[in-house]
Amino acid sequence: MSWAVEEWKEGLSPRVLQKIHELESHVDKLKKESQQRQFQSESLEAALQKQKQKVENEKNEVAILKREIQSLMELCDSLEKAKQKISHDLQVKESQISIQSGQLISSKRDIERLEQEVKR
């Protein structure tokens, strides 16, 4: 088959044949370069797609973390309000205990005074 491809070159001068050979070599070289560039292009495209997927995954992870942060902030606010309520309730109870303690002391004095009166 290659002899048929070469048949058209019959009768050409050696100089023209040399030039044809150079051009064919140059075409082969360009084809190889083209194949290499195509391979590089495909490799870069694959790497780009991989990076895009990685970025998309990270975006999803960031969105999940943002929702978790929001949830935790709401929980913290809720806990802070509960803490303030408990603190207020504690202050009220301490105040009540102080009042009752004062009443107890007053009642003990009254009892002691009454006991003194009864002894007399």
Image (spheres, helix red, strand yellow):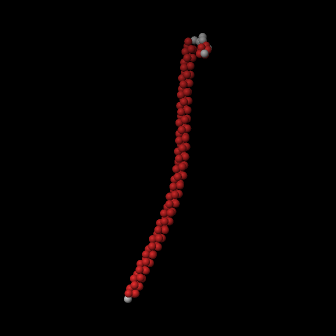
**Does 118 appear above or below 16?**
below
Measured from the top left, where is residue 119 in percent x and y?
Answer: 38, 87
**Does 98 appear above or below 11?**
below
Picture quadrant where residue 102 is located? bottom left
Of residues 110 and 84, the one nearer the viewer is 110
Q: Residue furthest bottom?
A: 120
The residue at the point 53 percent across, 33 percent down is 43
Q: Residue furthest front?
A: 119
The residue at the point 60 percent across, 15 percent down is 1
The residue at the point 55 percent across, 43 percent down is 56
Of residues 2 and 25, the one nearer the viewer is 2
Picture quadrant where residue 107 is located? bottom left
**Does 50 appear above or below 9?**
below
Number of callouts in the render? Answer: 0
Measured from the top left, where is residue 76 in percent x and y?
Answer: 50, 58
Of residues 62 and 78, the one nearer the viewer is 78
The residue at the point 41 percent across, 80 percent down is 108
Of residues 88 and 33, the one nearer the viewer is 88
Measured from the top left, where is residue 3 in percent x and y?
Answer: 59, 14
Q: Is the C terminus in the top left, top right, bottom left or bottom right quadrant?
A: bottom left
Q: Give the side of residue 101 with respect to residue 10, left or right.
A: left
**Does 104 appear above or below 22?**
below
